[in-house]
Amino acid sequence: MIIGDNLETGHNVIIREENTIGKNFRIWNNSTVDYGCVIGDNVLIHNNVYVAQYTTIEDDVFLAPGVMIANDPHPICTKCMKGPTIRKGARIGVNATLLSHVVIGEHSLIGAGSVVTKDIPAGVVAYGNPARVVRPVDSLPCPLGAVDHPYIAGRDVRTRERLG
């Protein structure tokens, strides 16, 4: 197992063997990263999240509380076992489920409670069961009116600066 600098964990966290994890990785209470995963830099996994074997999570990804990740289209078949690929800067909402083999595009936002059964392109908002693309992430307004566009693809909304 390889874990980069600045690991931060909550209580009851399990990180299994054979994982490669980047720097500034944060994983909070009651979450599990199963074996054989590749996780990039600056990833935050919130409470009560399960990351299945052979999942790839790129840099700057956020997984909200209760996210569940599957890795097998027909359980117990090790030939087909592969978790999703979550591309750079994607955000996955509360209690979303990602099924095996799907790809979540860069800077996309998956809505709370969604079930992702197919690939989601970059820079979009998708939600529902099954999750469907609804709009570009750049056009999503803040429901509280605090900021004009809270999810500008490829930008840090705190500073509005372009990310890596």
Image: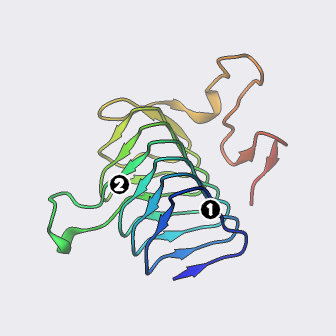
Q: On the rendered structure, is 86 left or right of 154?
A: left
- Report if the CB atoms under discs 2 and 1 are less than 8 Å apart: no
Q: Residue at x 65, y 66 (%)?
A: 41
Tell me the colour scheme of the image: rainbow
Q: Position of residue 65 (x, y in %)?
A: 51, 42
Up the image or down, 145 lies above or below 62; here it is above
> Nearer the N terminus, badge 2 or badge 1?
1
**Type of residue at label 2?**
Val
Q: Position of residue 79 (x, y in %)?
A: 18, 74
Q: Residue at x 14, y 59 (%)?
A: 74
Question: What mark, if any, has residue 59 been given in the picture?
Answer: 1
Q: On the rendered structure, is 48 left or right of 23?
A: left
Question: What mark, if any, has residue 102 been given in the picture?
Answer: 2
Residue 143 vs residue 28, the one in the foreground: 28
Residue 16 vs residue 43, the one in the foreground: 16
Q: Residue at x 70, y 65 (%)?
A: 24
Question: What mark, if any, has residue 21 been given in the picture?
Answer: none
User: Gap in Å between the C-alphas at discs 2 and 1?
Assistant: 17 Å
Residue 107 vs residue 24, the one in the foreground: 24
Disc tally is 2
